[in-house]
Image (cartoon, rainbow, N blue to C red):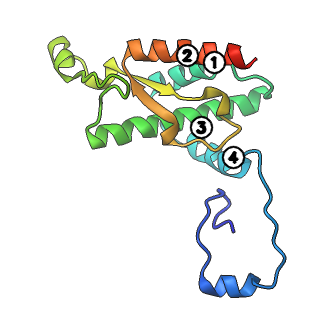
Amino acid sequence: MYQRSSATLRTLTDDERRLIADLELRQVATANSWIGIEDEFRLAEASEINPDVERAIGRDLAALEGMEAERLAKVKRRAAWIADRFIRERQRAGTIICDDCAFDPRKVAEQLGVRPRSLLDVHHKNPLDEGVRYTTTADFALLCPTCHRVEHVRLRRSKRQNS
């Protein structure tokens, strides 16, 4: 059962189970989570997003095809909103390190007089899922520039092999 229109599922209560016990239920596979995605369009539109994050996500999602321009803009904005939230979560947790090689930018950043976060990139693990599957902060990684470039080479090769 859907708890909210955002397609968030919850466990049924005993009373709810009794109410539906005699119903014939069938499982229906869904190809995507448009309900949740569209709910979050409004949240993303009303949010302040770091412009650098928004530009980077726009580049990550440049390969999305088959979507009308207005919807593509909303998908990109929502992805940037989630990526911005991902960064803030990582900053609060104090885990501003590369998820692949564990590079910790704090010492270098201190020497250069910049923020440690500025030396790491937010990587969208599977950009082609955006706007099709309900993506979350778990769909992002924090990578040093070298690991980020390597990951994009892997994605391109994988895409070519699957074509």
Give amino acid for label 3: Arg
Q: Quadrant of the C terminus?
A: top right
Mark nearest the camera among 2 and 3 is 2
Mark nearest the camera among 1 and 3 is 1
Q: Which residue is mark 3?
A: 78
| Mark 1 or mark 3, earlier in chain | 3
Give amino acid for label 2: Arg
Q: Which residue is mark 1?
A: 158
CA distance for labels 2 and 1: 6 Å
Give amino acid for label 1: Ser
On screen, residue 163 versus residue 105, left or right, reads: right
Dot 3: what SS? helix
CA distance for labels 2 and 3: 25 Å
Closer-to-camera residue (126/115): 126
**Mark 1 neighbour density, 10 Å: few (under 14) some (14–19) many (20 or more):** few
Give amino acid for label 4: Glu
Q: Quadrant of the N terminus?
A: bottom right
Mark nearest the camera among 4 and 1 is 1
Closer-to-camera residue (83/147): 147
Residue 77 picture location, percent across and down: 60, 33
Q: Which residue is mark 2?
A: 154
